[in-house]
Image (cartoon, helix red, strand yellow):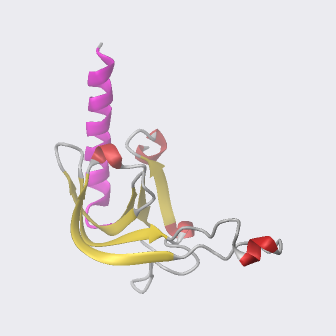
Amino acid sequence: MDPTTTSASSADDAALLITQRFIDRTVIVHIPDGRAFRGTLLCIDNGVNIILNNTYEVHRAPLPRGDHPAAANGAPHPAPTYTERNVGMVMVPGAHVVRFEVEHETMGAGSRLLGSGPFPTSSMAQAGWPDDPDMYG
């Protein structure tokens, strides 16, 4: 059996299962450059690209370098800050997805991206993409 075919088939199966379970749910898609996109999952196309609507791009601002005054005094660095911007509808290539998260149903409509961090981790299901079998069980 060709391992390339098995891998592609596995990714296609995972995409289909995610689409069936999480369509119209709020998801967060992380990409390798550190950005994440939080929006409503519309679909996953045949190329395993993720289509999101009402999407916010979230980027973590760089942490201060060691020459920051707080670091010189041995004090801890300030908490990281995040920036967000509304980007509307986006397509994230499946090959660039690092992590895929789904908001639980119990999240209130007033929840925000920003706060202590960009995402409320206690209310998110997290998984690798698309090869984490625990997500699809």
- Name the outermost residue toward the front: 67
Q: Position of residue 90 (x, y in %)?
A: 23, 64
Residue 7 is covered by the magenta coloring: yes
When the figure is inspected, residue 118 is found, relative to residue 94, above or below; the finding is: below
Residue at position x 32%, y 33% from top? 10
Asked whether 15 or 31 is in front, the reply is: 31
Q: Position of residue 9 (x, y in %)?
A: 27, 30
In the figure, is residue 24 to the left or right of 62? left
Residue at position x 29%, y 46% from top? 94
- Name the outermost residue toward the right: 74
* Quadrant occupied by the C terminus: top left
Q: Position of residue 38 (x, y in %)?
A: 36, 68
When the figure is inspected, residue 15 is found, relative to residue 90, above or below; the finding is: above
Q: Position of residue 11 (x, y in %)?
A: 31, 37
Asked whether 67 or 14 is in front, the reply is: 67
Residue 15 is covered by the magenta coloring: yes
* Quadrant occupied by the N terminus: top left
Q: Quadrant of residue 41?
A: bottom left
The magenta segment is 2-26
